[in-house]
Image: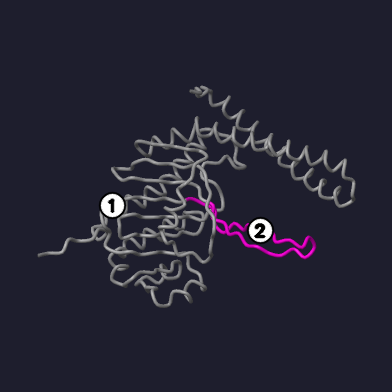
Amino acid sequence: MEEKQVMTNTQLEAALRGHRSAGTVFRLLTYAFGLGTILLFAAELTPVAVVTLVLTFVFGYQMSKHGEALKKLLGDNIVSGALNEVFENVEYKPFGCLPSKSIEDAGMVFPFEYSGVRGSDYVKGTYKGLNVELSDVELYNVSSHYDEETQQWKDEETQVFKGQWLVCDFGKELSGQVHLSANAKALRRQHRDDSVEMENAAFNGRFLVTAASAQEAYYLLTPHMMEYILSAAGKAGGEVYMAFLRGGRLHVAVKTGRDFFELGRSKADVDRLRQKFLGELHWFTGIMDELRLADTLYRKETQV
């Protein structure tokens, strides 16, 4: 088994900056040589184009290796500690993702269609007795078009969602099945028959609520809960989508346009990164804490 390297904060920060810088250089070289290869083939300079094509793959491989090394350093030295501080029984897979079936089962009401799922930073654990899964998720759509120049059909991939996705199993049947979606005119037209107008103008302005019956939406989305969700959505950094499933699961998806545990362009300050990751995790646990206190969350047993 590979042992984790013990590093001081100074050593870790230097290593993070090194991999980020190297990855950036190789990414630029990959793009530049890739473009050069296309131009050389177009100019029928085939021998030179073959050389630049090989170099493009070499640079691309190096870019990928530095990206993986950066992710492993973050995971081993910062992410794992933050996860263990928030959750229990943690299982963390930097290159894993939520199962696509789980995402499909949510029936999330999106203003777009998707045909594929991928992701990273898969987390599985428990939070105050609740089973939790969380990961970065990218949804994409593949469409085909006919290229007149080559006289061939080509597939074109379009990213429609990138962000974080939480699944929390409350272990009890919920009092309804309700979906919340970032407000969109197209969605309102599509869901005229199952949309629910809530008694909160600000909430209606930000979210489209769909449910089998208005009563189910009112049970789950109490005035206090709507105010909390509004406040949380304002700090989410992206569009918020939620699905309360009758079987007991809650799905929360936030379209942030970025990965969860990433260095980005920020300074490689270990302490700041740790606090940043903890803050992002607490955004999700805050929603779970609020729901655990809601006495209307669970389905009441029929009185005999």
The answer to which image quadrant residue 72 occupies is: top right
Q: In front of the other: label 1 or label 2?
A: 2
Which residue, given by chain and number where applicable, does mark 2 sit on?
Answer: 155
Q: Position of residue 122 (x, y in %)?
A: 46, 42
Tag shown at residue 292: 1
Element marked by disc 2: strand
Residue shown at 50% from the left, 24% from the top: 4
Q: Is residue 70 above or below residue 281?
A: above
Q: Position of residue 279 (x, y in %)?
A: 45, 44
Query: Which amino acid, mark 2?
Result: Asp
Magenta stretch bounds: 138-164
Q: Position of residue 216 (x, y in %)?
A: 29, 68
Query: Majority secondary structure of the magenta segment?
Result: strand
Q: Mark 2: give few (<14), some (14-19) or many (20+) Cα within 10 Å.
A: few
Residue shown at 29% from the left, 43% from the top: 128
74 displayed left or right of 18: left
Query: Which amino acid, mark 1?
Result: Arg
